Amino acid sequence: MRLSRLTIVVLFVALSIAAMAQSNPQHQTDAQKSFSAMKTLAGSWEGKVTTTPPDPEVQGKPIKVTLRVTSSGNAVMHEIQIPGRDDDPITMFYLDGDRLTLTHYCDAGNRPRMTAQLASDGKTLDFKFLDISGEMKYHMHHSLITLGDADHHSEDWTFMVGDKPVIAHMELQRVK
């Protein structure tokens, strides 16, 4: 099939308009805005973790969090390290259609997925449980990421032990 010059020009203009609308923050969906906010967290972070109820294995221990934009900007990888612990959980954040989704590769051997709601303040990403691959007895169930300034943010991760929640809270500061 041969396209006329006019058809090619019309297609080019339509694609250009679509690309500009997608890159314009005023025309982004909440999911796109949330994902853009996640990307600003790329870098290395340090802090301490507190748990409710207190878990002596991690309570008050230093924590390192690394966030990296990967896959040509289509994913953000989140990695947690607690000195003295062998596990190194990885979470991947990505746009899935019109929603921001995370998949958590858990040391419990499962992969829960959650989807985000952006709070009206534009600074809080509230990830709610969607589904899980693998055993559900122990699993990550909720995540709350609160953006501060360029060098501070907090994270709250809710881990379910049976039907009992354990909440890990981290106040994080960017490593320079």
Image (cartoon, grey):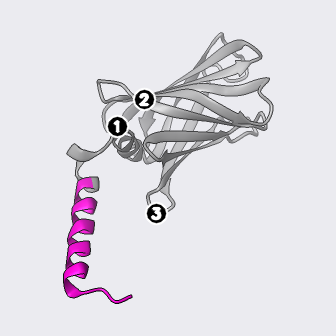
Q: Position of residue 59 (x, y in %)?
A: 64, 19
* Residue type, label 3: Ser
Q: Which residue is rendered at x = 21% and y = 86% of the image?
A: 5
Q: CA distance from mark 1 to mark 2?
A: 8 Å
The quadrant the N terminus occupies is: bottom left
* Residue type, label 1: Asp
Q: Is residue 14 magenta?
A: yes
Please report whichever mark, 3 or 2, sits nearer to the chain's N-terminal start: 3
Crowdedness near tag 2: few (<14), some (14–19) or many (≥20) residues, C-alpha within 10 Å: some
Please report whichever mark, 3 or 1, sits nearer to the chain's N-terminal start: 1
Crowdedness near tag 1: few (<14), some (14–19) or many (≥20) residues, C-alpha within 10 Å: some
Q: Are marks 1 and 2 in contact (CB under 8 Å)?
A: yes
Write down the region rendered in magenta.
Answer: 1-21
Q: CA distance from mark 3 to mark 1?
A: 21 Å
Q: Are marks 3 and 2 in contact (CB under 8 Å)?
A: no
Q: Nearer the viewer, residue 173 or 89?
A: 89
* Residue type, label 2: Gln
Q: Which mark is residue 117?
A: 2
User: Which residue carries the number 3 mark?
Assistant: 72
Q: CA distance from mark 3 to mark 2?
A: 24 Å
SS category of the residue bearing label 1: helix
Q: Position of residue 30 (x, y in %)?
A: 34, 37
Q: Nearer the viewer, residue 135 or 106?
A: 135
Position above or below: 89 against 8: above
SS category of the residue bearing label 2: strand
User: Which residue carries the number 1 mark?
Assistant: 30
Q: Which residue is rendered at x = 32% and y = 39% of the image?
A: 150
Crowdedness near tag 3: few (<14), some (14–19) or many (≥20) residues, C-alpha within 10 Å: few
Q: Is residue 140 magenta?
A: no
Position above or below: 30 against 69: above
